[in-house]
Image (tube, coloured by chain):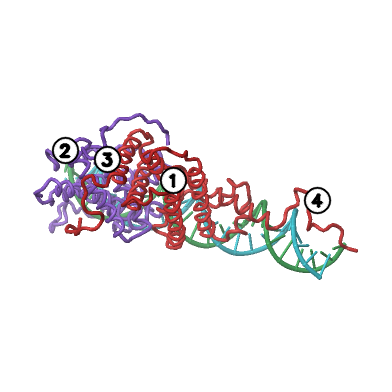
Chain colours: A purple, B red, C cyan, D green
Amino acid sequence: MPVPAEPQSQSASRLRRTQEERSTETRARLLDATIESLIDVGYAHTTTTAVCARAGLSRGAQVHHFPKKQDLVVSAVAHLATRRADELRGRAAELPAAASAEHRLGSLLSLAREALSGPLFLAALELWVASRTDVELHRALVRFERAAGRGLVDLWRDVAGPLADAARFDAVLELTMHLARGLALQQLLRRDDTARMRAFELWRELAIAALLHPSGAVPEPVSQPPEEDS
Amino acid sequence: MPVPAEPQSQSASRLRRTQEERSTETRARLLDATIESLIDVGYAHTTTTAVCARAGLSRGAQVHHFPKKQDLVVSAVAHLATRRADELRGRAAELPAAASAEHRLGSLLSLAREALSGPLFLAALELWVASRTDVELHRALVRFERAAGRGLVDLWRDVAGPLADAARFDAVLELTMHLARGLALQQLLRRDDTARMRAFELWRELAIAALLHPSGAVPEPVSQPPEEDS
DNA sequence: TTCTTTACATGCAGTCTTGACTGTTTGTTA
DNA sequence: TAACAAACAGTCAAGACTGCATGTAAAGAA
């Protein structure tokens, strides 16, 4: 039998890890490398070979855990959702206990904006665009993005506390998220942030005014006849 | 004399086209096919072979006019900018002469939103994302996108007429464009437009209020101390 | 220990895409 | 009509990426 030596009981067994430990760590390294690759070179240039090299593993390890490239990418979607949620929670925890309602709302708005910027947004953007021509990836993204959206709303309501009872609170938050995505998208072409930050400051003014002084100028809360299709 | 028929003045032969005519038509077909391909299958799956097939031409024709794939794509950027501008001007021309300032502003806001939606936006989005890892493409995009942005602002001011004198007019327009991009981006994951349209209706209310009744609640026009980095 | 399973490594074949090369048709000029 | 240039067509080789198949080490069970 070609079984030369049994190294069953490793004397200097500091390297000894359980299978599950090895497995989870390898998977995490592969998924992190995948996201990193998405950020660095984009979805199109994210090859399994390059991901393995980035993770410091062989292609065999990748094939073992994620037989098809799809498996790797779809799993990376879930991983990415987790990391984005973690980052968001971390930032939310750092929020200072602001004094005025205005200030607190402003911080919350900025929080929503930050949650949709940064490298992790770029990774998600790559996946969104790629999912346009990949139904399986699209399915995975919709599933996790929906959960992430709900998480963001819940977290926001949590931090907002009684402020969340303001009329049109949800609607303003939704607008803020859409706006944040648009701002982040513009980042692709213009790295300079100053103009965008100024624009967002204006939005903070308008949004806070709309939330705290709803008697401003708009009588109807939400519904109205959509007389024009546009 | 050995000059039988001077093709200089083409009498009836419609098949007989000058070199320039053939050339420009072929180039246009290739560029249109490229954009169509960007919309249909995305940048990653846009191969020169597929573009040729789509245009009903051979690979030789493509190679002749655009030796490298980069040449084809970069030229498509300019072509796309032209087509987007044309579409925008067309829609602007259809705008009815609205009675009230509110209504007119609302139409203009919707116009800005529409200008950043639709298939041509998808093509541009594919290029933006791709340009993240392609400096030459990025350069071309920045050049044309800047021109397109200015064109959009000018057109909007044109249509707006005296309304353009309102305080924060430009800032609100800029916010609207950012928001429109964010809305269009969300389209990738959720096809259903109703929620987004409702959100945009709210924005129209807020924006019109901010433009026509600037005494709402915000004292400062633009500048203010950026006490928080966010 | 012995056996089995899981984790990982390496090499290879098939497919796809690009860029280059050669050949043919159409238009222009002399 | 002849000569030339531009437009267009078809083929091919090199490189890259994926998926698979085979081989080895580590961990757990009997």
Counting residues from the N terminus, which is met first, the one under dot 3 or under dot 2? 2
Q: Which of C6/C30 is in front?
A: C30
Task: Point out which mark residue A63 bears.
Answer: none
Q: Which residue matches tag 4?
A: B11
The answer to whether tags 4 and 3 share a subunit is no
- Dividing the picture into quadrants, the one containing residue B114 is top left
Is the residue marked by circle 1 packed among few (<14), some (14-19), or many (20+) residues within 10 Å?
A: many
Label 2: chain? A
| Cα separation between marks 3 and 2 | 13 Å
Q: Amino acid at mark 4?
A: Ser
* Number of disc labels: 4
Badge 2: residue crowd in 10 Å (few <14, some 14–19, many ≥20): some
Q: Residue at x 13, y 52 (%)?
A: A94
- Give whichever of B157, D12 is nearer the camera: B157
For disc 3, the marked residue is: A174
C-alpha span from label 2 to label 1: 33 Å
Measured as percent of width and height from the top left, residue B68 is found at 54, 60
Residue occupied by mark 1: B115
Which residue does the numbered mark 2 point to in the structure image?
A164
- Kind of residue indicated by mark 3: Glu
Give the chain letter at badge 1.
Answer: B
Name the image quarter holding the C terminus of chain A: top left
